[in-house]
């Protein structure tokens, strides 16, 4: 290549060079017990919905068990939208063991560098964490939906004897 073309070609290539690329960089997570101690919450549950807002995913989870920090049957966590920014790749309808951290005082956040994983792959963590506490919630005994249904059933059962007596009175009075 002629020397006179090398310098313009160099500047042309420099002008079209890709911008800096950023990637998630993680330190190997500790043991399940160590990570539980550092996390704000550790729990298992099924992803109900995922909504993208700006560069964050808002993930709504129906909680089954809690090892730390969760007593409600439903939790919302956030994560970055992509793995390059250390976002965790949640999938709607799938169940996970989640190690969540406080996020700028605005709830819980999950990232790719935590021990968060699909529940079917978390057997070793669950054994190390122990049994955990059952969390009553949506669609489970003790959850808000079931409590309302049980209250309604109780009222119907209370009303049945009165309606049966009223029906007998009408039959016997004729």
Image (cartoon, helix red, strand yellow):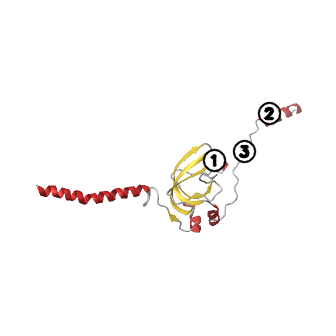
Marked residue nearer the N-terminal end (2 or 1): 2
Dot 3 crowding, Cα within 10 Å, few <14, some 14–19, many 20+: few
The CA distance from mark 2 to mark 3 is 20 Å
Question: Where in the figure is residue 151, as x and y percent of width and height?
Answer: 36, 58
Q: Is residue 15 above or below residue 55?
A: above
Q: Is residue 131 above or below residue 63?
A: below
Marked residue nearer the N-terminal end (2 or 3): 2
Question: Where in the figure is residue 44, as x and y percent of width and height?
Answer: 54, 59
Dot 1 crowding, Cα within 10 Å, few <14, some 14–19, many 20+: some
Element at label 2: helix
Q: Which residue was labeled with disc 1?
A: 82
Element at label 1: loop
Question: Where in the figure is residue 89, as x and y percent of width and height?
Answer: 59, 51
Are the residues at dot 1 and dot 3 in contact (C-beta closer than 8 Å)? no
Q: Which residue was labeled with disc 3?
A: 21
Q: Quadrant where the N terminus lies?
A: top right
Closer-to-camera residue (85/122): 85
- What residue do we see at 63% from left, 47% from top? 82
Query: How many marks do you count on the picture?
Result: 3
Instruction: Tell me: 141 left or right of 117.
Output: left
Are the residues at dot 2 and dot 1 in contact (C-beta closer than 8 Å)? no
Element at label 3: loop
Q: Which residue was labeled with disc 2?
A: 12
In which quadrant of the rendered view does residue 149 lie? Answer: bottom left
Q: Quadrant where the C terminus lies?
A: bottom left
The CA distance from mark 2 to mark 1 is 31 Å
Question: Where in the figure is residue 70, as x and y percent of width and height?
Answer: 54, 60
In which quadrant of the rendered view does residue 170 lie? Answer: bottom left
Instruction: Tell me: 145 left or right of 71.
Output: left
Closer-to-camera residue (140/90): 140
Marked residue nearer the N-terminal end (1 or 3): 3
- What residue do we see at 67% from left, 61% from top? 29
């Amino acid at each position: 290549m002629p020397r006179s073309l090398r310098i313009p070609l160099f500047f042309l290539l420099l002008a079209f060079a890709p911008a800096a690329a950023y990637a998630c960089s993680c330190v190997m997570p500790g043991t399940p017990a160590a990570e539980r101690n550092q996390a704000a919450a550790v729990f298992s549950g099924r992803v109900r919905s995922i909504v993208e807002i700006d560069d964050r995913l808002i993930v709504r989870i129906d909680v089954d068990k809690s090892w730390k920090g969760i007593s409600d049957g439903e939790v919302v966590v956030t994560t970055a939208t992509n793995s390059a920014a250390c976002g965790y790749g949640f999938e709607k309808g799938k169940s996970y063991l989640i190690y969540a951290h406080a996020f700028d005082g605005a709830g819980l956040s999950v990232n790719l560098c935590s021990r968060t994983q699909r529940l079917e792959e978390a057997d070793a963590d669950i054994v190390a964490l122990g049994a955990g506490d059952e969390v009553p919630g949506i669609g489970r005994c003790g959850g808000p939906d079931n409590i309302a249904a049980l209250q309604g059933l109780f009222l119907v059962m209370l009303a049945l004897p009165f309606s049966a007596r009223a029906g007998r009175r009408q039959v016997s009075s004729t």
